[in-house]
Amino acid sequence: MNIKFGTDGIRGPVESVITPEVCLRIGHASGIVLKEMGWETVLIGKDTRVSGYMLESALQAGFIAAGINVRLLGPLPTPGVAYLTKSLRNQFGVVISASHNDYLDNGIKFFDGNGNKISKEVEKKIEKLLTGELRPVPTSELGKARRFDESGDRYIEFCKGTVPSDVSFQSLRIVLDCANGACYKVTPSILEELGAEVVCLGVNPDGYNINQDCGSTSPSRIVDEVIKQRADFGIALDGDGDRVILIDKEGNKLDGDDIMYILAYANPNRTGSWSGIVGTKMSNLGFEEGVKKLGYKFKRAEVGDKHVSDMLQKEKWLLGGEPSGHIICRDLVSTGDGTIAALKVISSLLLLEKDPSEILRNYKKIPQVTLNVDVQNKDIIHDVNIKQAIKDIESDIIVARVLVRPSGTESKIRIMIESENEATAKKYSEDLAKLFTK
């Protein structure tokens, strides 16, 4: 059993990697480690995948065997679990989700008592125990499990409370796509209780349709619906609610860079904890130059919202994120939260009395081409011919940046090339992709 933590927890196909036995062992091993750190209770949330029920049972059995008490939250967005982990205190949180992947995958994410992803050091301690003997604590010391039925209501009230009291959503029509995932109940309620007229997509999960041609990874349907409904905004979330893509009334897609630029522009205080912004190696070079012109410092983290969060904590800054839509507003939340980011952007635009296009015209993105290539073995990235091809592309003076990396969550190689000449970036990206598929 060679189970390792990746970019965002442990993730893989349910039939071969994230099996009930694996989850039983993860619960037991992590329970031992976290109990030694002083935690006695774990909150377990999940998204809407059909495998969630099975894995939830195995995971809680492992925790109980380690002497950890379990509180079952039911379907809840990943950031909702992070919020409750922090607000209920003296507990840690686990989410059963494979985020934006399809229903065939699932995974496990951990949060500490502050609502942050657990450290690499803790992950390594858990990994070391995964192959050990699974021996329960004495029967008198076994943990106990119960359901916590208030989780959704508490998260709804928290999200509503982040909207300034002088901001009203009553004049807004919003198209919302919940990707048939964990937000399907809570986010429509949040927007409706704030007064918006909400047109819902992706709110009928059946266990198999999570992220299926919907949500932040497939926004074409919501774009059409925003135009059809003459809506003011579209909000597209992913399966576990930690990513968001926004749509303006003209049907333009606003990615994570656009969302962060609006938040940076709207913020009047650019000193202290608001003096800098964290992006990743995938952040557009035009975005970096744009926020620097606004007076911010800018740093790039490795890809993954955990790395963004770690750098924000190190720099003591409050805003960071990824083009994919992981946005961390650390003045409000401890992790990426698609619903919170959407609420904050819409509130900011209402206060400024501006459309997104009026703000976004102040910076220019460099054409960026990204490709995801399916591979059998991600170590192919170390092939000498591929390394040489990357160097040759980087030497072209009209190429701004080249990034080729293995996915931390899927069997894919991700290729990104930026160039003022989009056709050049497209050709080089396709040439590289062919090398990985030979």
Image (spheres, rainbow, N blue to C red):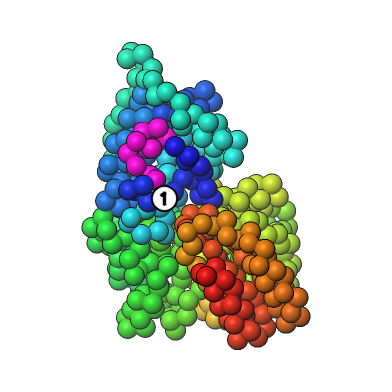
Q: How many marks?
A: 1
Q: Is residue 366 above or below residue 153?
A: below
Residue 219: percent from left, percent from top: 40, 73
Question: Who's the residue at 32% across and 25% down the image?
Answer: 144
Q: Is residue 433 visible?
A: no
Would residue 290 appear left or right of 226 to someone viewing this image? Answer: right
Does residue 132 sit above or below 359 in this rendering?
A: above
Within the magenta stretch, is there residue 20?
yes
Residue 140: quarter of image: top left
Side of 44 where 278 appears, left or right: right
| Helix, strand or loop: magenta stretch | helix
Q: Is residue 169 left or right of residue 325?
A: left
Q: Quadrant of the N terminus?
A: top left
* SS type, badge 1: strand
Q: Residue at x 72, y 53 (%)?
A: 272
Answer few, some or many: residues within 10 Å of disc 1's Cα (few below 14, many 20 plus, some between 14 and 19): many
Across and down, in percent, residue 307 comes to 61, 51
Pick the residue in front: 192 or 93. Answer: 93
Q: Amino acid at mark 1?
A: Gly
What residue range appears in magenta? Answer: 17-27
Name the residue rendered at 36%, 59% in the picture: 102
Residue 382 in the image: state x and y as whole percent. Answer: 63, 59
Q: Which residue is mark 1?
A: 12
Residue 393 within the magenta-colored segment of the rendering: no
Q: Looking at this view, is 97 or 71 the one in front? A: 97
